[in-house]
Amino acid sequence: KKRELKHTHIFHLNGKQHPHPLNGHHHYIYTIAFSPKGNILVSGSYDEAVILWDVRTRHILRTLPAHSDPVGGVDFIRDGTLIVSCAGDGLIRIWDTGTGQCLRTLVHEDNAPVTSVRFSPNGKFVLAWTLDSCLRLWNYVDGRCVKTYQGHVNARYSISGAFGVYGGKEEEGKKEEKDEADDSGGGDDDEGPPKKAFVVSGSEDGRIVWWDVVSKEVLQSAEAHDGVVLAVDTREEGRLVVSGGIDKTVKMWERAEGEKEKGEDGAGDGDGEGDGVPEENGRQHGSVNGVHVENHIKENFANGGGGGGDGGGPGEHVNGVVMDIDG
């Protein structure tokens, strides 16, 4: 009989496995995540439990009887004080890291199985993937689903995605200076249009799909893999996107500046002055199966094409991006 693996291993950066695995689950371990400080590890399993581990001592801090179906996803909030978990029982649960108390249970009226969850960068929302081809953004404090994103296919597989930002006028070289100015409250509001937030996800039909967070508009859909796109993540605020598929490849995508600005050829907002933002193209610049690819795909969201949201007011923020999320 094939031996079932029911423990978690920690590896050093050089690839060397730590000699002592983390034992505690009774079935397959499906999802894991480090806390922001790296001192706590959370794992979710087919045994329907969530376990918090002390990384240094490798001891169990607490075991949470989290769900009544296998746990599909876990994530830490940005300050490490909260954990979110989800499962095939259709429930999303918010946990206090320090006490293990369940602070909130979120469930949609359709009660579709939830396969993956992620906190927004500002920690105010939870994004959930469900097997009814929907992504839902939850205000977990109020217990409300505030946005639903559709346009991808997700009915069988556990897939995931990420947040990012697009648009804006600042130059890459000034980004660090601007971040420091923003932190100190001295940012310049006259530098151009604000950045906007997007959500990106894989799809079972081989595509990667981007949505504007506020308007829910599909900003871009790119043919990415031969078969299901299981995992997508971003870095550098979404300038780089990495995807992994059932075709056994990992591909990286970047937004590269084009030569023209919106408005030069009448494709801007119609005021004849352009939007002042270089047009960007998504370029797949490599894959780990050894094949180098230069496959340019135009991104409609390069110049803030996602619309300005559903309503007015000060809004919320994701990655420092203004979002009128409750419009």
Image (tube, rainbow, N blue to C red):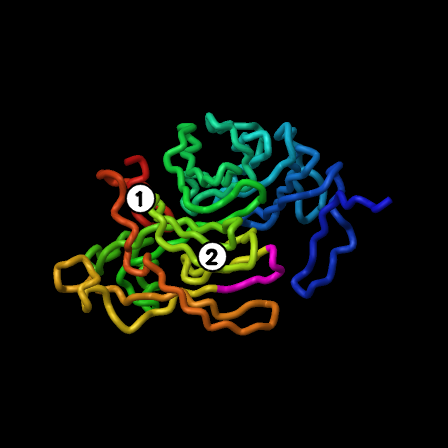
At x 20% / y 60%, what residue is drawn? Answer: 268
Please state which amino acid type lies under the numbered disc 2: Thr
Packing grade of label 2 (10 A; few <14, some 14-19, many >=20) is many
Report x, y in % for residue 209. Answer: 43, 52
Q: Is 20 one of the magenta-colored residues?
A: no
Please state which amino acid type lies under the numbered disc 1: Ser
For marks 1 and 2 on the same chain, the one whose residue lies earlier in the sequence = 1
The count of marks equals 2
Report x, y in % for residue 102. Answer: 55, 28
Secondary element type, mark 2: strand
Label drawn at residue 234: 2
Is the N terminus in the top left, top right, bottom left or bottom right quadrant? Answer: top right
Label 1 and label 2: CA atoms lie apart by: 20 Å
**Foreground pick, 196 / 253:** 253
Measured along the vertical axis of the image, is residue 226 above or below residue 91?
below
Q: Quadrant of residue 43?
A: top right
Q: Quadrant of residue 63?
A: top right
Secondary element type, mark 1: loop
Report x, y in % for residue 204. Answer: 53, 49
Left or right: 241 in relation to 277: right
| Residue furthest out toward the top | 109
At x 44% / y 32%, what residue is drawn? Answer: 140
Region of the chain picked out in magenta, as a range: 246-252
Measured along the vertical axis of the image, is residue 189 above or below residue 263?
above
Measured along the vertical axis of the image, is residue 226 above or below residue 95?
below
Report x, y in % for residue 300. Answer: 32, 58
Dot 1 corresponds to which residue?
215
